[in-house]
Image (tube, grey):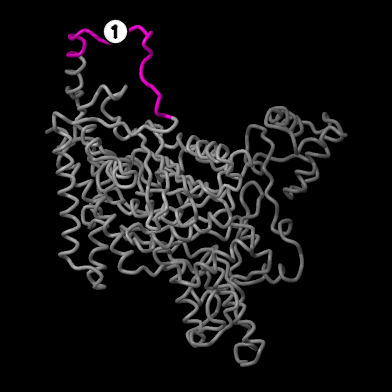
Amino acid sequence: MTTTEGIDSAGTANLAFLEELFAQYQNDPESLSADWRQYFDSLVDLADHSSGSGHISDEHTGSTNGSVPAVTPKKSEVFSADESVVRAQEGAGLLDDDTMITPDGIATGHALALANGSVQLPDAPAGEVKPAPLPDELRQSQGSDRFAFLQDRVDQLVRAYRVRGHLTADIDPLGRPRPGLPELDPAFYDLTEEDMDRVFSTDTIEGPQSMSLRQIIRRLHNTYCRSIGVQFMHMDDLLVRQWLQVRMEGCENRIQLDRKQQLRIYRQMTTAAVFEEFIQKRFLGSKSFSLEGSESLIPLVEMAIERGASQDIQDVVMAMAHRGRLNVLANIMRKSPQRIFREFADLDPELHVGRGDVKYHLGHSTDYVAENGRKVHLTLCFNPSHLEYVNPVAIGRMRARQDRSSDRARQHGMVILIHGDAAFAGEGIIQETLNLSELDPYRVGGTLHVIVNNQIGFTTGPQESRSCVYATDVAKMLQIPIFHVNGEDPEAVAQVVSLAMDFRREFQRDVVIDMYCFRRRGHNEADEPAFTQPALYRVIDQQPSVHESYLEKLLTLGEVSRDEAMRIADEHRARLDAELSAAKRDDYVHRSDIAGVWAFYIGGREKEAADVDTGVPLDNLQSLLRRLVVLPERFQPHAKIRK
């Protein structure tokens, strides 16, 4: 092997050595061995510096420190010289070399599209590659050749909706504009208004065998661009993609709910909203990490459990962080409101090793009775303030249960993980957990991931916290679909849950539901979010609650009366009032719900452990507290803070 044969695989540790050799080459090429001279001469040839001396000036290297240059190939070196490429290069609107090629010599996607034979039309915006226009001889023709050309363009439009439709979907309840995409415009494919009522074959679309172009576009828009956006075309398996296409396009991604189902969803959202309202009024200033603005999470999780019960799921392990945890405990896990209220008032300190924030760290378990009469055991894992670190624990817990019960087919247990959008994009434990999902020792038959996407992480918006389009983009590492859904459209949420649960059952893979919503209050109830996000919270302050919006829809449809809706809310408020009164009674008796294998577990400090004096002198505490309320010199606080 010659000295330079291993250079392409050389690590960065050799970079200093290469730079030193290159500097020597610039000063005196003859001082190098023949193979090194040949290597550096080849860089000269690639960069088209044919001065004959072998020297490369700083003007061409873009460097004054002797660094080995990053050579940018010429256009002729990136593209082959076949006829289609020659036509592409001669076509109008061709991109400049510096646009098509990155500084390290790698061709961009646009350059490769040109190389594959696509041609830009003269009116194409810079960097936007369009299909070739309809040839003049076909434009005047009414024969089969013209129809075949148009049919091909319609098929391209269908694929564009499947691949890119999610980018324009109406998934943000705050109604902020989504980008327009030229690929979804019929004119992009040289389809005109006179083609809109022309009938085309729709063999590739679920539904009738033929439809007009207008009907095709309506069906595709309803399926991929309404309240649900779907990313699934990155999956390699054609049969899996077709399964999803059939399920989505056949019903235009909309589930038909009867009055009983609609009323059930409204009741769940109302109980979620009333619970948050009650906490805010009765425990003023207490941290609860409210679910306000994201109340659709409650019907989403309940629908997933109901669907699971119909699929013979008997055991569900759940894990989540603190956002909405108390609401889930009360309305999904059926934890007694009395106990939650006593935890707010800290009336049972002897039951807990810690104090203060323990209520939204606690886990719970219960037996849930589904509408079909089947019993499903629910477990919500304990989780301290480490957000996503509980995820592999929950999955491991389910795998242990499956192994213990000999459920080798992974048919009777399910994991539901509830994430925050900022944490899902920002924490490495997410990628690590996803990476385990398809490995035999860790498989659980598919995990349902639910992202409560309130579009803010503490005080940071998506544009400052991630480099990807969606918080869920890390999940594209797996061959799984990602459903983005508007949380203000509960019936779209119902469709996504049904589809996600059936996909999980059919293919035993993870599936992701990215529920877009908003956060009514600050990160916790003590925060004022308008300090850091004033524009966003001007919009949120004018936004009605989700259950109010859904009520207006049901009133319009005539599915519920306003009196009936008021009665549902009043009944739940009365129940919570009664629970709070009972929680305050002196004769309250705590009943442990720890049973089964945990019945004899005794937690807390070891009896043999010595007491530790954690106190500090009172003078020190007073001094520190005084410093906390003294503003630094020349510091101008916000007006509300000054008060």
Tell me where residue 290 sits by quadrant.
top left
**Spot occupied by residue 635 in the image (x, y as percentages of width and height):** 20, 28
* Circle 1 residues within 10 Å: few <14, some 14–19, many ≥20: few
**Spot occupied by residue 28 in the image (x, y as percentages of width and height):** 78, 31
Q: Secondary structure at mark 1?
A: loop
The residue singled out by tag 1 in the image is 613
**Helix, strand or loop for the magenta stretch, by majority:** loop
Tell me: 49 left or right of 555: right
For the image shown, how many numbered marks are present on the structure?
Answer: 1
Between 344 and 548, the residue placed more toward the observer is 344
Q: Magenta residues, as a range?
A: 598-623
Residue at 80% of width from left, 41% of height from top? 41
- The stretch drawn in magenta includes residue 616: yes
Tell me where residue 63 sits by quadrant.
top right
- The stretch drawn in magenta includes residue 410: no
Between 162 and 34, the residue placed more toward the observer is 162
